[in-house]
Image (tube, grey):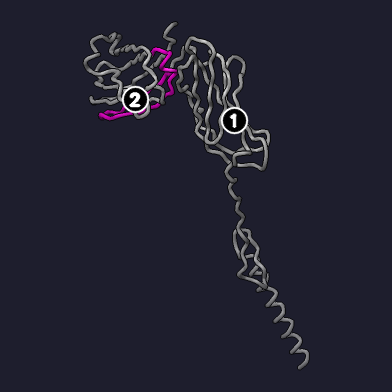
Amino acid sequence: MRRLFTALLIVAIAGITTAALVDVFISGSGERRSALEPGATASPTTTAPLPACDRNQLVLELEVLGATNAVALRHVEGPPCQADLTLLVFVTSHGWRSETPLLDGAVLDGAYSQGVERSVPFSICRAGSEFTAEAIAGPYHATGDVQPGGENCEAAIREVAVDFGRRPGTIQFRITPLDPVTHAVSFLIDLPRRTDVRVTAQAGAGPFLEVLDRGQRESCRHIAGRDSCLTDYGPLGEGARDRWTISVHKRSEGRAHISFAISFVPADG
């Protein structure tokens, strides 16, 4: 009798041990669960977002990099932090003050920590002397003497191509102009002669600029079934300093490949 009881006890212990092992290995996804606590799960881990930078953690400064003026936002003290600031730069010479375009660097955002900085170049393309710049980014402010010149004062071309399907439609693209106060602009558009399009440009939320439409096609050059259309403008002024949206409205049927060469040339060049 005692032998039978001992045998049954061994079988029972073996069964419990086997059940525990099964419970450990069938929990799935490689995550082992305790045999004594079958409902236990791993605690999720999260990374807290960086706090916003306070006034004393960053500093805004003006500097000269080679022959180009620049604004730098630097981390100077405290733990890592997060910034999201819009940068504005105003230049004054002999009492005349204007905002300076910053191309694609008008936003100073991202994580800042010891030794990290964001530098944004800017150019002064008009003639004159005794230039003073004022940079503003949220609560940060910097003022100092700067020099004329910079990369933005050279001529540049923005080249873009768009492809339309068979049906009429509209395609838009965006470009960043050189300074429209100091630069003249021209549009060279190459398109199939059979394609009926209207092209407009808009700076920010400003008025539309008519670039090409049916009435202007007579002055285009006709080359092997395609038209090459040139439209020239002088400097467009401060109202055109925002980023441009170019809208191409195709009214005709048929596929069309249309290419753009948008040139910016110093007005006194």
User: What span is in magenta?
Assistant: 158-184
Q: Amino acid at mark 1?
A: Leu
Under mark 2, the amino acid is: Gln
The question of residue 177 being in magenta is answered with yes
Element type where label 2 sits in the image: strand
Q: Which of 17/178 is in front? A: 178
| Residue at the extreme left of the image, as rendered | 215
Q: Quadrant of residue 243?
A: top left
**Along the line of sight, the residue nearer the viewer: 198 or 50:** 50
The one of 180 and 217 positioned closer to us in this rendering: 180
Front label number (1 vs 2): 1
Q: Are marks 1 and 2 in contact (CB under 8 Å)?
A: no
**Circle 2 Cα neighbour tier, 10 Å, few/some/many (<14 / 14–19 / ≥20):** some
Q: Position of residue 4 (x, y in %)?
A: 74, 89
Give the side of residue 242 with respect to residue 254, left or right: right
Of labels 1 and 2, earlier in sequence is 1
* Residue sitting farthest toward the top: 269
Q: Residue at x 61, y 50 (%)?
A: 47
Residue at 61% from the left image edge and 19% from the top image edge: 64
Query: Residue placed farthest to the right in the image?
Result: 2
Mark on residue 60?
1
Q: Position of residue 125 (x, y in %)?
A: 48, 13
Residue at image location 50% in from the left, 20% down from the top? 91
> Where on the picture, by quarter, is residue 113?
top right
Q: Is residue 85 left or right of residue 27?
A: left
Q: Is residue 122 above or below residue 58?
A: above
Circle 2 sits on which residue?
202
Quadrant in which the N terminus appears? bottom right
The secondary structure type at the circle numbered 1 is: strand
In this picture, is 6 found above or below 232?
below
